[in-house]
Amino acid sequence: MPMEKITFANQLLQYLITGLTVGSTYAMVAIGFNIIYNVTEIINLAQGEFVMLGGLVMVFLHVAAGLPIVLAFPLTVIIVTLVGMLLDRLAIRPIRQPSVLTLIIATIAASIIIKGIAMFIWGKDPFDLPAFSGRHPIHFLGAVIQPQYFWIIGFLIVIVIFLTLFFEKTIIGKAMSACADNPGAASLVGINVKRMILLSFALSAAIGAVAGITITPISLMEYDRGAMLAIKGFGAVVLGGLGSFPGAILGGLILGTIESFGAGLIHSGYKDAFALIVLLGALFLRPSGLLGSIEVSKFKRF
């Protein structure tokens, strides 16, 4: 009996570690959602495609082209960042008299196009990426920890620190915050609102690329993974609070933990359904999210 209890406790610890790791990825996707939303009030449903591109471009540069990881990593982030900027230039900015619904539909169309291009380039097979520190597992209190887990959680911490310093200490970050509060007033004081929107798409794409690069060694990557990652990232946003960066992190970690425990204790076949259940529950019980504001502002035209 004692052995069974220890074994079950070890399983719970394993589910927790796995959930926090996957949740860190969802948190990065959710942060990308919030960066664009805070400046434009657009829900960018192509956010998951940035994650997908991050993984597949990294596979091409590091595995197929043979570039070292220290060179392939930043180059992948730059390429996906350029894709994010093109999304703003080609799909968002040309729309005249935009409404929230029109812009969201534009991001859906962009998501479909990016997915189609990825399928044409990489095909339908999933791709693996070598783990950054090898795949020799670490045993901790009966749980098995892959070294890649530390990279995923570590990059989330680095992103949080970077964004905190960026928005609080830099002039550009403060200008983006001003555009989020009142784009009309920001424009009157000389801030280029369109440039800040472009930067928000670039930052969002870069963070998505990092998420895709770090998650691929443990979960593979294929052309159609972006849609589900976007749904789960958006679920984390809704759970934590739309527009709240601490809420995005909290929502992502909670969502990943619920998904891991549900898959382990109930059935792994329903793993993806748990994100949708949490999303629906949050919308019914607390639409503002755990750390979000109940205030709904008007759409900011730009």
Image: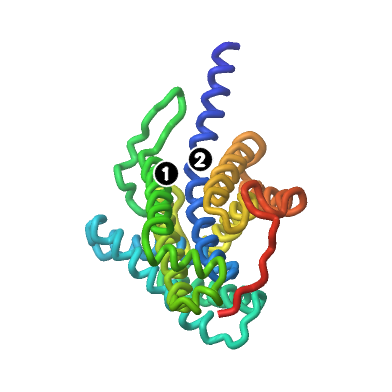
Residue sitting at 42 percent across and 63 percent down? 173
84 horizontally vs 60: left or right: right
Q: CA distance from mark 2 to mark 1?
A: 8 Å
Q: Which kind of residue does numbered mark 2 sit on?
A: Leu
| Residue 210: mark in rendering | none
Q: Give the labeled residue for mark 2.
A: 20
The scheme the figure's colours follow is rainbow
State left or right for residue 291 relative to residue 68: right
Q: What amino acid type should be assigned to the residue bearing mark 1? A: Ile
Query: Does the image show residue 120?
Result: no
| Earlier sequence position, callout 2 versus callout 1 | 2
Q: Looking at the rendering, in which quadrant would you find the N terminus?
A: top right
The residue closer to the viewer here, 79 or 292, is: 292
- Residue 70 located left or right of residue 137: left
Task: Tell me which residue sits at (47%, 78%) in the image.
Answer: 194
User: In the displayed structure, would residue 291 be above or below residue 54?
Assistant: above
Mark 1 lies on a secondary structure that is helix
| Viewer-proximal residue among 172 and 69 | 172
Provide residue 73's location: percent of width, then percent of height: 30, 59
Q: Residue most toward the right?
A: 284
The residue tagged 1 is 153
| Residue 5 occupies quadrant | top right
Label 2 environment density (alpha carbons within 10 Å; few <14, some 14–19, many ≥20) = many
